[in-house]
Amino acid sequence: MTPRQNPLSSTRLRVGAVLGVIVLVVLAGWTVTNLANPGTSPSASSGFGLASLPPGASTSPGIGSSSEPGDSLAPGSSTGSSPSAGSSPAARTPAPTNKPTPKPTPKPTPQPTAKPVTSIKLALAFSGFSKPIFITGSHDGTNRLFVVEQTGHIRVIVKGKTQSTDFLNISGLINYDGAEQGLLGLAFNPSFKTNGYFYVYYNQANGGNAGNIMIARYTASGGTNVANPSSAKLMISPIPHTQFGNHNGGMMAFGPNGLLYFGTGDGGSGGNPTGTAQNLSSYLGKMLRINVNSATPIKPTIWAYGLRNPWRWSFDSATGDMWIGDAGQDRYEEIDHVSRSQVLSSTRINFGWNIWEGRACYPSGTSCSSHGVTMPVAVYGHSLGCVVVGGYVDRGPVAGLRGNYFYGDNCSGRIWRLVAKAGNQTGVQVADTSLSISSFGTDDAGNEYVVSLGGTVYKIGL
């Protein structure tokens, strides 16, 4: 019987070997051709082999740009003087001579969804202040806290004890009217640990100029608890605010691009009769920004407009987003939110006042268009309060509070929270207090506090 032919006989192996050599030669030629002509490799649009941008990378102007973002948007003349109503917007503002100091905050990363907090506890932290309107840490590694008193004093708290000597006393320079004017804001330079610079926002006390908005820089050296009162340097030309005493703004903070942002009120009275909020030739009713490293006095850039009185607002320390509490007129209080990319942008934002109040046309019963208007993410009616006080997105050590934005009302003492995300929300009430809430604030560790005009400061907890 003839043996069955093996499928891998020597004859077939030889044929297979020859075919294999031919295939290898063809492949080698294809490889050489592509190495010599790299344009035949996959295109960038295919996504193959492309390096990812680092977190937070953006094409928006920011740190390292040769000029301040949005510097072409400043109103008025190029002389650095404050604009007057009806003056014509200038052409491009000269580029700053120095780059802004970058804020030492981490690049934004995706944040976990906040837990649904339904109630918070307030523990008395400090007391004995006179008209306190703000509290903040200096972020210089000393873990001190600084309390701003509307009467013109800044008090310093060291290891839980309020020092008997003021950190700064400028009561002789300010116009404290017992209502809305006085010493209103404080911000520490991102490099405060090395340069000792900090900035104050106040109303001028000087005869016919009483009420004008002033921003000045002071110096405190080497972590000392007393600043140098003779180190004052005006950062901007005075912004006229003499016609009415209310709606002065007052909050300042450094943004993720190293620029100093500050919010001004619309100049006062009711309904913005002077029309400043929508007038781009006025610095009132605006969110402004400056490069503090430029020559002074600095001409502010209008970053946003259409604000009534952004008394308290903040940056999210984790994302760079901005959250604004803008006080309403007759019916609604509002919370506005803008993303980090918008914060860095040179595109102006219009928050709508005095055409919109909250999400309703102003005055009531009129018609209006929302085209080009950034609408609030949350509103509440005057049955729940009358003056919104913006707060902070919690990024502190209490895990259950993180990712929640807390804010309150000066009249009712209520405190609400939102989830720190884009889009419309309804605030969840988490506390009903008897406090006359003037501000929220944070320490260097991220703990959040509530300030009452009655002289007390409370720490938020669960």
Image (cartoon, grey):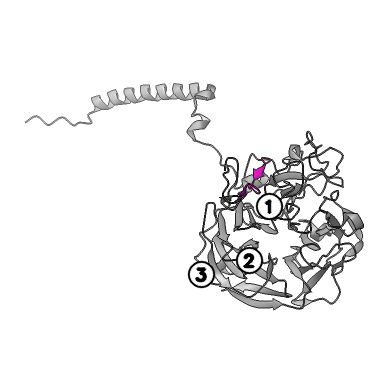
- From this viewpoint, is residue 372 visible? yes
Q: Residue furthest front?
A: 365
The CA span between labels 2 and 3 is 17 Å
- Which residue occupies the foreground of this view, 66 or 423? 423
Callout 1 amino acid: Gly
Q: Amino acid at mark 3?
A: Thr
Q: Badge 2: few (under 14), some or many (20 or more) residues near its Cα, within 10 Å?
A: many
Residue position marked by numbered label 2 in the rendering: 409
Pointers 2 and 3 in contact (C-beta within 8 Å)? no
Does the magenta run of residues contain 453? no
**Mark 3 lies on residue:** 118
Q: Is 51 or 107 nearer to us in this picture? A: 107
Is label 2 or label 3 in front?
2
Between 17 and 57, the one nearer to me in the picture? 57
Query: Is residue 381 rendered to the left or right of residue 233?
Result: left
Of residues 48 and 18, the one drawn nearer to the viewer in this rendering: 48
Q: Which residue is mark 1?
A: 271
Q: What is the three-letter code of the residue carrying label 2? A: Asp
Label 3 neighbour load within 10 Å: few <14, some 14-19, many 20+: few
Which of the 4 quarters of the picture holds residue 12? top left
Res. 204 image quadrant: bottom right
Q: Earlier in the sequence, mark 3 or mark 1?
A: 3
Depth-wise, is mark 1 or mark 2 nearer the camera?
A: 1
Magenta part, dominant SS? loop
Residue range (magenta): 345-356
Helix, strand or loop status at disc 3: loop
Q: Is residue 144 visible?
A: no
